Amino acid sequence: MKRSICLMFGLLLSGCNGIPTPFVSDAAYKDAFMVTSSFPAPLMYQASAIQWNEDYAVSAKHTPYLSNVEHRGRGDVVFIKRKASAPQWRQATVGERVTAVGYSPLMVPVKGTGHVKEGKVLLKNLNDGVLYSAHDGPSVVGMSGGPVFADDGSVVGITVAFVPTRYTQSVKSDLASAERVSVFMSYNEIEKEWHRFQGDIKVPAPIVASAP
């Protein structure tokens, strides 16, 4: 049975919970890209993003003033108007290895690898009712909205936060023993937001990969 925890957690990726690995180029993660804030605070805020389908990309809603946002989800996701080729998406499985990819505050591409946990997280400060997934890889400010890749190259979600382990050590799930808790919005939860958006506008569905 899937377990969840409810955390009073007010900051989303405001620091780091480990040291992600910088890289110059990696063909496996080329689909991640950086987004920045626009007016009234141009270039003051920076986040990461990934293409959802040929017409839209997704990033984290908590990053203020992103450009070309056409839909703000109930959860921590926005759909950004952007034409580009899209990666395959699917739901993660518990225990599989994943790699979160994004951009550090120095605008350097970084990645952190971990394993998907069974425990789910409710971010009480968002009050959105979304059950967020978690892995135990490192993440850092700037990776918000960036893709979480499975080893087969599929995208399984986007990074939204990390939780200090002092909040999870007493919970009754596998999060209690995790060295780190990095939180991501899973494909299934993003897809729910997509269907809400589709109620207003007809747009193509994402490419869905098969689970390994």
Image: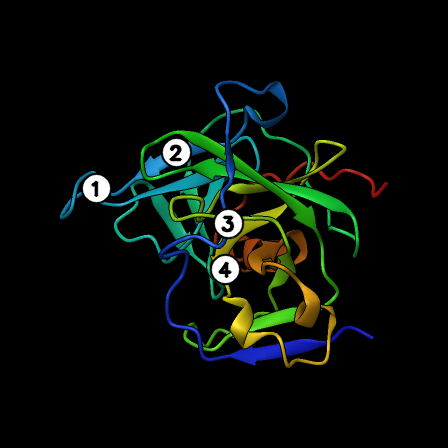
Look at mark 1 in the image and give the residue it sits on. Answer: 38
| Distance from Cα at disc 2 to Cα at disc 4 | 19 Å
Look at mark 2 in the image and give the residue it sits on. Answer: 34
Tell which of 166 and 45 is nearer to you: 166
Which label's residue is closer to the chain start, 3 or 4?
3
> Which mark's residue is nearer the viewer, 1 or 2?
2
Look at mark 4 in the image and give the residue it sits on. Answer: 162
Q: Residues within 10 Å of mark 1 (few under 14, many from 20)?
A: some
Residue 195 visible in rendering:
no
Helix, strand or loop at disc 4?
Answer: strand
Residue drawn 43% across and 72% down?
126
- Tell me: residue 59, above or below residue 170: above
Cβ–Cβ under 8 Å for marks 1 and 3: no
Q: Amino acid at mark 4?
A: Phe
Quadrant of res 72: bottom left
Look at mark 3 in the image and give the residue it sits on. Answer: 18
> Which mark's residue is nearer the viewer, 3 or 4?
3
* Residue sticking out furthest to the left: 40
Q: Amino acid at mark 3?
A: Gly
> Which mark's residue is nearer the viewer, 3 or 2?
3
